Image (spheres, rainbow, N blue to C red):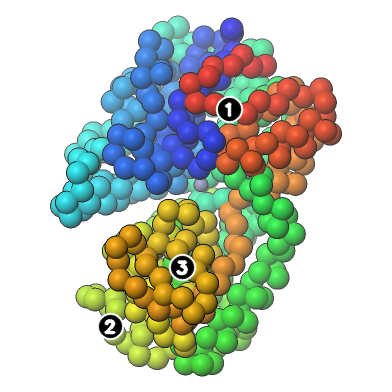
Amino acid sequence: MSATFLPIGTTDEIGDACYLLTLNGTTLMLDAGVHPQKEGWKSIPEFHLAEGRDIDAILISHCHLDHLGALPIALAHFPHASVLMSEASAVLAPVMLHHTASVMHRRQADGASEAPLYTHDQIDLIDYVFQGMKPHQPFPVFNLDKWDNDLQAQFFDAGHILGASGIWIQGPETTVFYTGDTAYHEQEILPGAKYPEGLVDVLITESTLGADPSAENNRRKDVVQHFARSITEVVQRDGNVLIPAFSLGRTQEMLATLHRLRNEDQIPDVDIYTAGFGDVVSNLYDRTVKYTRRRDPDLRLKNLDILSLPPGDVRRGAHLSRPSIILVSSGMMTEGTMSYRLAEVMLPDPRHGIFFVGYVDPDMPGYQILAHKNEETLQLVPEGPDIPVECTVQRFHFSAHSHRRHLLHLVDRLSPRQVILIHGERGAEGWLRESIQNQHPEIDVVIGEKGREISIG
Ligand SMILES: [Zn+2]
Ligand SMILES: [Zn+2]
């Protein structure tokens, strides 16, 4: 097999993304993520499946932790691999990894049985090898034994979040495009993805929204209007709006959206609050503005009129004593986080609204809130107190992933001989496989499986 693909992390849901791609004797690792719903050593890819292979380079598509979080462990296994990512990802990656180490240390201090996977010192020992590459410019990838560069690679802006890239790799015989997480549509801050002009032999694509028929009909403009109307209703009855959001990507997009809506009088003139690690990431969105694609190159998040939540107990303070909008992590309301503690006090009050704007896993407290029936009490965590639910709970589909019709268009456009589906539930991957095969019976469509190496090209 001169060209092969081997997933060594989760492929049948959103988990620890990590794939080995071998072209012409050079082996690349695409992404090195942690599973967001697992802890400790259970959350990382099975690096032992890569034993006996020389990994020449690790290419990181973007800095969400399901793609980046296991990089320090990957480098412990393969210390001489070069590490390549987009310029903006190289700014974000050390910050995201240090934040992850802090969270793991805090969890250990709170009594978690798992030791942290890595320490701040270990990150300091590796982050100087992260190479930030300019998007849309080809660069050589060296084979460390032959000291040869018969592979070329290129990062294509993938929309999604700051720095996110699709990765194009060209070997002497085979051309591969890996989408990473991709958003074809524009968001509030980031424009939509750019894709290679030419054709490819193998397309490796995410499948996140493959089982979601509603996503393809959701027009962003309609979602934003509905969101604005719902905020207005809460504020008019003297309530507060809580928006739980992920720190990287969704927080910045929502801050810019809320600020614009308030400026355009589409929502009332109330204070907008934020806090925590999302602020650190917002700062990096500003710092990288000159060399990343933006819809409005003049927009600076630090110039928006957004307030910081006062320090101390988030369940008390000026932000709750009059109508306001509070945008904080965590997006899925992990126990003990700011959004979790605010939800505890807001759920029983009919004036308030809790608005979800991103993915929520069924095991998380946020999902309990979304799934509850009116007039019932609710336990956010097993054996937690019964909380009456009186406030409004709504979900808005602000996606940072391409919907499934856009993924099918990408297949049409790149005209691959083979498509490998990863990063989605089995139902999502199944729908995409069937749809691609119906339209293009000549394409070999494979659903990636952890531990199963396939021949590609
Ligand atoms: Zn992502
Ligand atoms: Zn992902």
How many C-alpha atoms fall within 10 Å of the one at disc 2: few (<14), some, or many (≥20)? few
Tell me the mark number nearer the camera, choosing from 2 and 3. 3
Amino acid type of disc 3?
A: Ile
Tell which circle, 2 or 3, labels the residue nearer the N-terminal end. 2
Quadrant in the rendering for residue 247: bottom left
Image check: 337 left or right of 297?
Answer: left
Task: Report the front residue among 295 and 31.
Answer: 31
Residue 95 position, x and y percent, is 33, 49
Name the residue that disc number 3 marks. 369
| Viewport quadrant of the C terminus | top right
User: Would you say residue 264 is visible in this rendering?
Assistant: no
Tell which circle, 2 or 1, labels the residue nearer the N-terminal end. 2
Q: Which mark is residue 448?
A: 1
The answer to whether 398 is drawn above or below residue 32 in the figure is below
| Residue occupying image coordinates x 46% and y 76% | 376
How many C-alpha atoms fall within 10 Å of the one at disc 3: few (<14), some, or many (≥20)? many
Tell which circle, 3 or 1, labels the residue nearer the N-terminal end. 3
User: Is disc 2 in contact with disc 1, using a CB cutoff of under 8 Å?
Assistant: no
Name the residue that disc number 2 marks. 316
Q: Secondary structure at mark 3?
A: helix
- Cα distance in 3D space between marks 3 and 1: 33 Å
Residue 106 position, x and y percent, is 21, 53
User: Is disc 2 in contact with disc 3, using a CB cutoff of under 8 Å?
Assistant: no
